[in-house]
Amino acid sequence: MKTMKSDVNFYHYRPVLFFFLAYLFTWTFWIPAIFVPGNLGAGLMLIGLIAPAVVSTVIILTSGSDRLKQDLKNKIIGFYKVKWLNVLLAILVFAAVVVCSILLSTVFGQSLNQFSFTKDFSFTGVGIGSALITVTLASIIEEVGWKGYCEDSIGNYMNWFWESMIFGALWSFWHFPLIFIKGTYQAGLMVNPLYVINFFVSGIPLGFIITWVYLVSDRSILACMVFHLFVNFMQEKIAMTPETKCVETIVVTAATVVIVLANKDMFFETRHVGRLLDTVGDKR
């Protein structure tokens, strides 16, 4: 009798291997960047940034699964899959989160002047052009790793609610070495431990929203790239204070609760478990 594991179409996702290698190769370059100034340090940071995408792509290309390879291709070039109205809705939701956060922050003595653009990026260790490139690359390259393999490797074994929780926590902690690298946004938070804690906590609800964007566009990487770029730009260029960003974490968590409740079947169904690649054609 033929078992699932003997089926040539079956692929066994390996999330532990992915995260081990993604952390290993990212931190291998980011930790030395703590002690290396200037362009060399920036170069090490860039290499570390692309590590998850490289790990994801290598795992897929060496998997021996035509379905997995085809799935990556579909997610990258399948522009027809993107539900642009849903992406726009997600962008508007995050914009509303920013507006509400600034308004609420005034209760705690923050200024309405936060409704303005900053002159520079928070990456004080590099030029504006380099910072803009970094923000753009982070939006594009990171998603090749996180959505190319990572999220599916977790989601193949559980519902998307718990996948989002695990992914959000691990994705957030992946940034840890950056708090020690002078000139990064994360290093600027070191003036107050609360700001650092808030940064890592905020990644969890944001992970839910990105998963939502991913799923409503039929697992499109492009949709996530567009949303990620908007989030990065808003976080960098809107003149929110660190205190307001703590308020923002509360507001984005509330928005996440609403999104999950409005999409309960999406987040809690288990029909996809063990079957993510079932609808992908196999050329074998």
Image (cartoon, rainbow, N blue to C red):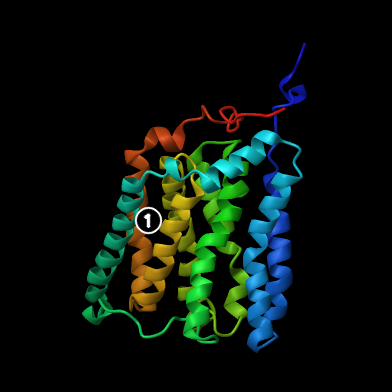
Judging depth in this view, the residue of 214 and 28 nearest the camera is 214
Secondary structure under badge 1? helix
Judging depth in this view, the residue of 178 and 86 nearest the camera is 86
Q: Which residue is drawn at the image coordinates 38% and 36% (left, top)? A: 264
The N terminus, quarter of image: top right
Q: Please tell me in which quadrant of the rendered image residue 243 appears.
A: bottom left
Q: Is residue 93 above or below residue 6?
A: below
Provide residue 79's location: percent of width, then percent of height: 45, 46
Provide residue 240's location: percent of width, then percent of height: 33, 76
The answer to whether residue 207 is visible is no
The C terminus, quarter of image: top right
- Neighbor class of circle 1 (other Cα within 10 Å; few <14, some 14-19, many 20+) is some
Q: Is residue 106 above or below residue 51?
A: below
Q: Name the residue type under label 1.
A: Thr
Provide residue 265's location: percent of width, then percent of height: 40, 32
Q: Which residue is drawn at the image coordinates 52% and 47% (left, top)? A: 77
Q: Which residue is drawn at the image coordinates 45% and 60% (left, top)? A: 228
Is 22 on the left or on the right of 178, as rendered? right
Is 198 on the left or on the right of 178, as rendered? left
Q: Which residue is drawn at the image coordinates 53% and 66% (left, top)? A: 138
The answer to whether residue 135 is visible is yes
Q: Name the residue under label 1.
A: 253
Farthest top residue in view: 1
Count the marks: how many? 1
Judging depth in this view, the residue of 84 and 145 nearest the camera is 84
Q: In this view, does 98 lie above or below 32?
A: above
Judging depth in this view, the residue of 282 and 240 nearest the camera is 282
Is 100 on the left or on the right of 188, as rendered? left
Provide residue 195's location: percent of width, then percent of height: 46, 75
